[in-house]
């Protein structure tokens, strides 16, 4: 990484892998800080301590957190993430903000008092800094749960010498989730109604957690350059396109990476047989084993995988509309995911209708997800929008060729093979329609069935793809420098 000033960074997220995970945010929060620490920065993570997080944690401090007329106690506990830099073991500190009332529950989100829970978390993050005597150059906030931290720094703490020189970066991982709560929540931040205006935090009569981050952060980022452009338009802006456009000079897009230690086909203990570039043909063993596990015939038909949240955003309606034709083309399909009951039921019914072609696992199963990434020939992501997408990056890491709709991070990481034979690493389509998706799948099937040498080249190109965090971490360092200059 380039020779830049080493910084003190507090990385704040509601979920962090391996401690608590619902989606891709946890993967980013678990791996990007490691890449930043590998560059010599003093990086620490702050997250809630949920009931599901077990293990020995050291007590660090406790302090009262003012929540309107009462105080709640925050207990700070600490653990570490072990990782390697050039073969040397390193530790990344993780601070767990513990409060029995708010976080000792089964699950992470979707509680009636989520606004209050994450208001406490935001208040506690800033209170923690003095309690542990850590004065970061940057607080890197992620998604709606952390947006008010940026507001509090500028509105409540601006004259406090301990906090006055702290800069903020706010990253939007998915603009669709904004954290909308009644105006009364302002009381929990101990802040005046002067912030509840259309140019600050008010949003159609509600307090908007995410908007508070966008308005007050020194630098705003999202997880691909394409998505950064898309969210400034009415189609993708979720009614915040005007605000985002007004901040376009401070809005950046950086594609996520993936953890190359966790996602490594040569060492991954969760897949059926390890393989790599030199023995990539062992991938067929993973395909046959996946077919057996999912009760599909051991066939040479192209095997297409999906690991996804079952929501409309993911373009699953296109797949449902096109599936009869896809089966006629001659494919097998393995789907893993959970979400909307409509999609869960629809895909279960399709597996019953086509038992030799379609297998479905409804639920959350990380080992099976890895076996799908490693055992399939192709990986399908027909998303309506996709801020970055990790599935296409992980699938390529395992030599599985992506078929994607060209939007957000998918547009930046997947180059269509038919448009660029030298650099193409997958197949893509632009129009959000079943017909266009079918054409892209058909093109992939034709290469797979009729041009085995070209297909092998695609597999090797996927295996050679560099989707590690190194380049993205360098870009984040440049963002941090921009943010620091705004304050100091």
Image (cartoon, rainbow, N blue to C red):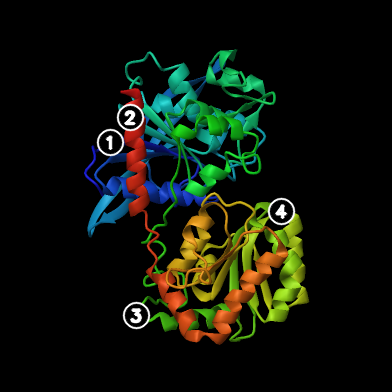
271 relative to 241 in the view: left or right: left
- In this view, 337 is above or below 357: above
Which residue is at a point 37% across and 53% down the rendered structure image? 469
| SS assignment at label 4 | loop
Disc 3 target residue: 278
Q: CA distance from mark 1 to mark 2?
A: 10 Å
Disc 2 target residue: 484
Q: In the picture, residue 307 is in which quadrant?
A: bottom right
Q: Callout 3: few (<14), some (14-19), or many (20+) C-alpha neighbours within 10 Å?
A: few
Q: Earlier in the sequence, mark 4 or mark 2?
A: 4
Q: Callout 1: few (<14), some (14-19), or many (20+) C-alpha neighbours within 10 Å?
A: many
- In this view, 293 is above or below 85: below
Q: CA distance from mark 4 to mark 2?
A: 42 Å
**Which label number is shown at residue 7?**
1
Q: Earlier in the sequence, mark 3 or mark 2?
A: 3
Where in the figure is residue 269, as x and y percent of width and height?
Answer: 42, 70
Q: Earlier in the sequence, mark 1 or mark 2?
A: 1
- Depth check, front residue: 225 or 158: 225
Q: Earlier in the sequence, mark 4 or mark 1?
A: 1
- In this view, 289 is above or below 212: below
Disc 4 target residue: 340
**Which label number is shown at residue 255?**
none
Which residue is at a point 42% across and 26% down the rendered structure image? 126
Asked whether residue 44 appears in the rendered view, the answer is: no
| SS assignment at label 3 | loop
Q: CA distance from mark 3 to mark 2?
A: 45 Å
415 relative to 236 in the view: left or right: left
Q: Earlier in the sequence, mark 4 or mark 3?
A: 3
């Amino acid at each position: 990484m380039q020779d830049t000033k080493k910084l003190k960074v507090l990385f704040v997220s509601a979920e962090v892998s391996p401690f608590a995970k619902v989606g891709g945010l946890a993967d980013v929060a678990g791996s990007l800080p490691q890449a930043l620490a590998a560059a010599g920065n003093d990086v620490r993570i702050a997250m809630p301590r949920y009931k599901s997080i077990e293990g020995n944690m050291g007590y660090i401090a406790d302090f009262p957190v003012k929540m309107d007329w009462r105080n709640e106690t925050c207990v700070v506990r600490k653990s570490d993430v072990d990782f390697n830099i050039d073969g040397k073991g390193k530790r990344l500190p993780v601070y767990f903000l513990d409060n029995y009332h708010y976080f000792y529950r089964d699950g992470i989100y979707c509680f009636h008092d989520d606004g209050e829970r994450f208001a406490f978390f935001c208040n506690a993050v800033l209170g923690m800094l003095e309690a542990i005597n850590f004065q970061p150059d940057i607080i890197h906030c992620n998604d709606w749960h952390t947006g008010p931290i940026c507001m509090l720094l500028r509105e409540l703490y601006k004259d406090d010498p301990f906090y006055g020189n702290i800069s903020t970066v706010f990253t939007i991982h998915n603009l669709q989730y904004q954290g909308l709560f009644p105006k009364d929540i302002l009381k929990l931040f101990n802040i005046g109604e002067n912030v509840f205006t259309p140019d600050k935090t008010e949003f159609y009569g509600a307090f908007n957690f995410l908007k508070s981050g966008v308005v007050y952060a020194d630098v705003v980022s999202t997880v691909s350059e394409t998505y950064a452009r898309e969210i400034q338009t009415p189609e993708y802006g979720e009614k915040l396109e005007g605000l985002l456009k007004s901040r376009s000079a401070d809005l950046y897009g950086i594609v996520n990476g993936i953890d190359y230690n966790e996602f490594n086909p040569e060492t991954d203990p969760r897949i059926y047989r390890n393989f790599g570039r030199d023995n990539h043909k062992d991938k067929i063993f993973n395909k046959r084993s996946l077919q057996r596990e999912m009760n599909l015939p051991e066939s040479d038909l192209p095997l297409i995988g999906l690991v996804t949240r079952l929501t409309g955003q993911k373009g699953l309606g296109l797949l449902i509309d096109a599936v009869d034709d896809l089966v006629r083309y001659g494919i097998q399909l393995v789907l893993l995911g959970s979400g909307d009951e409509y999609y869960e039921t629809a895909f279960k019914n399709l597996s019953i209708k086509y038992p030799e072609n379609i297998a479905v696992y409804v639920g959350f199963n990380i080992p099976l997800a890895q076996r799908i990434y490693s055992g399939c020939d192709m990986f399908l992501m027909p998303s309506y929008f996709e801020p970055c997408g990790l599935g296409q990056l992980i699938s390529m890491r395992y030599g599985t060729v992506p078929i994607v709709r060209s939007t957000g991070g998918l547009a930046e990481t997947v180059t269509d093979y038919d448009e660029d034979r030298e650099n193409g690493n997958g197949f893509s389509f632009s129009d959000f329609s079943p017909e266009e998706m079918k054409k892209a799948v058909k093109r992939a099937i034709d290469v797979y069935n009729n041009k085995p040498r070209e297909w092998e080249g695609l597999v090797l190109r996927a295996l050679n793809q560099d989707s590690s965090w190194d380049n993205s971490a360098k870009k984040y360092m440049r963002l941090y420098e921009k943010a620091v200059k705004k304050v100091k």
